[in-house]
Image: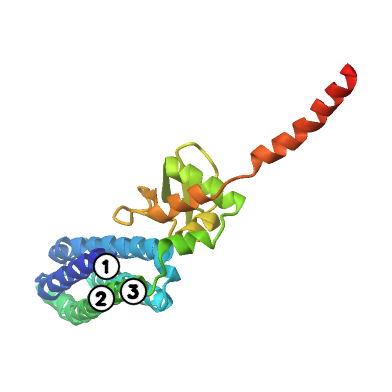
Amino acid sequence: MASQLRQLARDFEALKARVHAVSYTPGTDALRRIGPLLLQAQDLTATAMVRLTALDNSAYTHVAGSRASLGLLSSVVSSSSLAGTDLAHVLLANPYEGAQLAGYPADDEAVRAARHAEAIPKMSGHLNDAVHQLDLCATGCRHLAHGIAEDLASAQDHKPPAVQQTAGAALSPAQYDALTALAVGGRLYESSTRGLGVTRVATKDSTRVSIATYRTLAKRRLVNADASTSLFQGQKITVTDQGRRALAQHRPHTTSSTTRAVAPKATVTQGVHR
């Protein structure tokens, strides 16, 4: 995750430089030059949202200080979205060159120059606001990458041996079934329901795994998801070595119950032969 956030910081820096250096003439030229910047800002907002969702679904949320990191990453999503809004406002302030309504005189050069002179300060102001928001995004991502790397290193230094962790925490039946299914294969993905993103778990053998159960397994570091891919494409879920040890230590008590159910039948049969 830290490396992905550093890359995201570089992407925000690159877009900030493009917005700061953009040169345009009001009208069609401005639309052609600023429109792609708006689309890229929206793409980066989507990427930041994917990173936030992945971090929220990861075992990192069990680490002290992770709440502040989630808050900072959500502020990156907000600033990125605001940068996109600022760029959209540039296009709103842009004086387009379409024909006037019937009955109105066409613009002459003096009128056109006056419209441009009125629009340019507004457009420049929105561009400056976008540059500021993108700078906040890049700074936030850099701080996050550094902070998460430090948090994980500190947690690793203070983490008890893995055998002790799994030995003291038994799996519930639902967790055992989910972990068994995910060991075969599973993916974490997000779908849109009524405009809201819903995170779900899909397993290769079609076992139903609730997102609550998955998050519990993730917090116990029994599973993790590949955050390098988008949740909309589906992130591959892997059972960790600690998770496999937990499976090996968990023994469902089905054999003894079966024996108890069969035993009375054997007693009855012996009674008949007597």
Image quarter of the C terminus: top right
Density class for disc 3 (Cα within 10 Å; few <14, some 14-19, many ≥20) is few
Q: Gap between marks 3 and 1, in whole Å?
A: 18 Å
Q: Nearer the viewer, residue 15 or 234?
A: 234
Residue type at the position of mark 3: Asp
Q: Which mark is residue 2?
A: 1
First reached walking from the N terminus: tag 2 or tag 3: 2
Identify residue for label 2. 146
Q: Are marks 2 and 3 in contact (CB under 8 Å)?
A: no
Residue type at the position of mark 1: Ala
Identify residue for label 3. 157
Closer to the camera: disc 2 or disc 3? 3
Q: Which type of secondary structure does the marked residue at label 2 adopt?
A: helix
Image quarter of the N terminus: bottom left
Residue found at the very far top of the displayed protein: 273
Q: Gap between marks 2 and 3, in whole Å?
A: 17 Å
Percent x, y of residue 160 = 42, 69
